[in-house]
Image: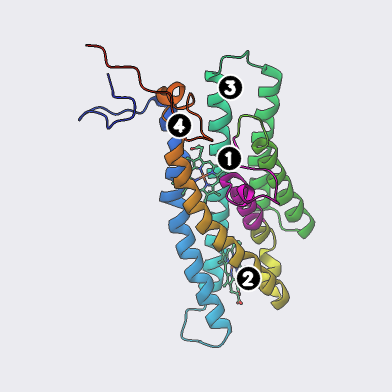
Amino acid sequence: MLPAFGIPPAGVVALQTVDWFWLIHPAAAVVIVYPLLGMVLRLGLQARARRLGQTKLPVTSGRDHADLGRWLTAAVVAAVLVALVVVILSKVLLGDGPIDLARMALLALVTAGTAVSFSCLWLVKRAVYRGSFALLCWIGLIGLGLQPEVWRLGDNPFQPAFWQSHFWGGIGLCGLMLFSMAAKPETQRSLRWRRLHLSANVLAALVFLAQGISGPRDLLEIPLHWQKPAIYACDFGARQCPAAAPAQP
Ligand code: HEM
Ligand code: HEM
């Protein structure tokens, strides 16, 4: 048997299938989202430097930045959708209570609607459609995120816990990315929109940084599935756990 809080013996992988599902989101963030963010940031700074007169930079940097920006938005939305679906499904399917099939069907519809809204945002051209599909996609993510299965550090913006919350950071980031994607043609055309884009994305860069800290923090705090009964018996406020039972001879 594995020691409850120790290092697994050599050769033993302590994760069960459900834990691997929980790993998809952090792995996607590390392997796809953050490398893309690096490229988008660099190309954005090049586009700005070029516009401010440093003409040695490639003409394509603005267009490449916007193209990769769309993929960055897609990666962020997909990573968040995966996290929410995994959290909700694993808690519903592995919980003790009865499964409310009508609610599950409604949530499946919202998930599909969110993905379809994003695909439409990618395809449509008219400003009113771009705005509507971006908003629909964001509302879908918020609707899924507000389900009782999704744990949130705090919901009150007047308390520090809200600003340290990985969930609200993620929702805010999705909003900023969807806005940038919806306003892409305007950002290309007008200086005023470019300034707005820049302000929104300086904020987004800071939230990306915060997510890169609060995500690993959550990863440290969430126990493996088979460890949950022991860990959740602890008093989190007092940071104390019940004394371990003496080892059997
Ligand atoms: C963290 C993410 C992002 C950052 C830091 C960022 C930063 C920037 C910067 C610095 C510029 C140059 C502004 C100027 O010329 O003064 C720019 C331009 C632009 N960005 Fe972004 N951006 C981000 C995400 C996105 C996304 C997701 C999109 C949407 C697809 C996007 C679309 C554009 C467009 C269309 C331009 C104008 C390019 C041109 O001049 O042709 N950006 N961005
Ligand atoms: C692009 C940056 C990221 C965004 C927008 C984001 C957003 C989210 C959202 C909205 C959730 C669901 C709510 C919740 O359970 O807290 C979530 C869950 C989670 N995130 Fe992130 N996250 C990002 C990066 C990361 C990183 C870098 C890690 C760790 C390396 C991480 C670890 C987690 C973990 C452990 C969960 C719990 C659920 C699960 O694993 O599926 N996140 N994230």
The disc label shown at residue 240, or none: 4
- Residues under labels 4 and 1: Cα distance? 34 Å
Residue identifier under label 3: 92
- Which residue sits at x=63%, y=13%? 98
The disc label shown at residue 81, or none: 1
Contact (Cβ within 8 Å) of mark 3 with mark 1: no
- The local crowd at label 4, few if under 14, some if 14 to 19, many if 20 or more residues have their Cα within 10 Å, is few
- Residues under labels 3 and 1: Cα distance? 16 Å
Quadrant housing the N terminus = top left
Can you tell me whether the CB of the residue at mark 1 lies under 8 Å from the nearest atom of ligand 2?
no
Residue identifier under label 2: 198
Amino acid type for the residue under numbered disc 4: Gln
Across and down, in percent, residue 77 comes to 58, 47
Q: Secondary structure at mark 2?
A: helix
* Residue 63 visible in the current orientation: yes
- The local crowd at label 3, few if under 14, some if 14 to 19, many if 20 or more residues have their Cα within 10 Å, is some
- Residues under labels 1 and 2: Cα distance? 26 Å
* Mark 3 or mark 4: whose residue is earlier in sequence: 3
- Which residue sits at x=40%, y=22%? 226
Can you tell me whether the CB of the residue at mark 2 lies under 8 Å from the nearest atom of ligand 1?
yes
